[in-house]
Image (cartoon, grey):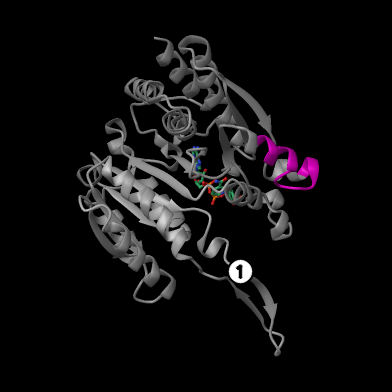
Amino acid sequence: MSKKIVVLAGDGIGSEIVAQAVKVLDCLNQDFDLNVEMEHGLVGGSAYDETGSPLPEATLTLAKESDAVLLGAVGGYKWESLDIAVRPEKGLLGLRSELELFANLRPAILYPQLAHASTLKEDVVSGLDIMIVRELTGGIYFGQPRGIRTLDNNEKQGFNTFIYKESEIERIAHVAFETAMKRDKRLCSVDKANVLECTELWRAVMIRVSKEYPEIELSHMYVDNAAMQLVRAPKQFDVMVTTNMFGDILSDCAAMLTGSIGMLPSASMDKNQKGMYEPIHGSAPYIAGQDMANPLATILSVAMMLRYSLGSEELAVKVEKAVETALNQNLRTADIYTDGDIKVGTEGMGDAVVAALKA
Ligand code: NAD
């Protein structure tokens, strides 16, 4: 039986990078018997322009009825002055919460071909393979109350709420421990338990859940130290688990270890392995429409989709190998280019991956 994917290109470079991922899926359909049907929908600023909402009902229905969602990116200057309730980012946050995608997996892997493209010394990053597990539907990004209020003296005050229930921490803890079981069995939980009660509870729940996974070596680190350790000695980490906001920041930091944010895919999962797959970067408005964006994070997100939601480890590995083949041919988009490489655009990189799949 065929599986259904909804494709949401979004804004900025979204349509360019997603087009390359769709080429990969088309190739897998034609040449490797992947039986998926794709439907396209609107999200973000482009959805707001057409419908007045960054997450139209039709998109949400499509997403709910699909087996997996492939997303490009949302946002851009054009929509920055809109009320926060209808900004493009609300479309993305809405999808994550409506689909209950509470577990965000963000692998930071350094391809050996890109060791010299990282801003860090080669010996610090070569061999890097970290999995960041970020809680995605709770914490300060969703906590209530929130807003900007005017005080008695007419001064404005902005406020947000950092909030987690035990059950929310428990479910992400299980995903993190299960992930670590399939890897090097080391899990580092990142919090700020010395200052924030919310993460004092986070730490206590992590310790409690760890009793069910005696094989896993659990450690704890404050987020400020974790940021420093990620650039000082990143290879000390195997799996990291953290809150929504800390994971957002730390995974961008980890992205740079791999050469470029254009290389990092992600999977956001619900409890039934339904997932939304997207590069971790944004809509990069500066380079949109110029055939400059790196499509590999989006193509690698397709590999994650194959692995986690479409049940095909074999095709996932094929896609990852095809990406490596393109890199072995020294093909590089501008963000990962260094002297001596062959510069290609978004389309050129997508074509190279498809050619490697067909070879
Ligand atoms: P960004 O990730 O779009 O860009 C950061 C930097 O990385 C820029 O220099 C950009 O040119 C570069 N970059 C990003 N993706 C790239 C790619 N594939 N290839 C080459 N270079 C790439 O972050 P930003 O500039 O902070 O935000 C731009 C817009 O994107 C904002 O509206 C923001 O809200 C939105 N955003 C969306 C998401 C998402 O959709 N998941 C995530 C982050 C930011």
**Residue 76 lies in the magenta-colored region:** no
Compare residues 162 and 71 and report the one nearer the observer.
162
Q: Is residue 251 visible?
A: yes
184 vs 110, left or right, is: left
Q: Is residue 289 visible?
A: no
Quarter of the figure with residue 225? bottom left
Quadrant holding the N terminus: top right
Q: Which residues are magenta?
A: 49-62
Q: Is residue 225 above or below residue 1?
A: below
Q: Residue at x 37, y 42 (%)?
A: 107
Compare residues 159 and 345 and report the one nearer the observer.
159
Q: Is residue 122 above or below residue 318?
A: below
Give the structural element (helix, strand or loop) at label 1: loop
Q: Residue furthest bottom?
A: 153
Compare residues 288 and 234 and report the one nearer the observer.
234
Horizontal and vertical percent for residue 57? 74, 43
Q: Main secondary structure of the magenta part?
A: helix
Is label 1's Cβ within 8 Å of ligand 1? no
Q: Residue at x 69, y 77 (%)?
A: 149
Horizontal and vertical percent for residue 69? 57, 35
> Is disc 1 surrounded by few (<14), some (14 to 19) or many (20+) residues within 10 Å?
few
Q: Residue furthest front?
A: 212
**Residue 59 lies in the magenta-colored region:** yes
Read off the residue under disc 1. 144
Q: Amino acid at mark 1?
A: Gln
Q: Residue at x 41, y 24 (%)?
A: 312
304 vs 88, left or right, is: left
Horizontal and vertical percent for residue 359? 39, 9
Quarter of the figure with residue 9? top right
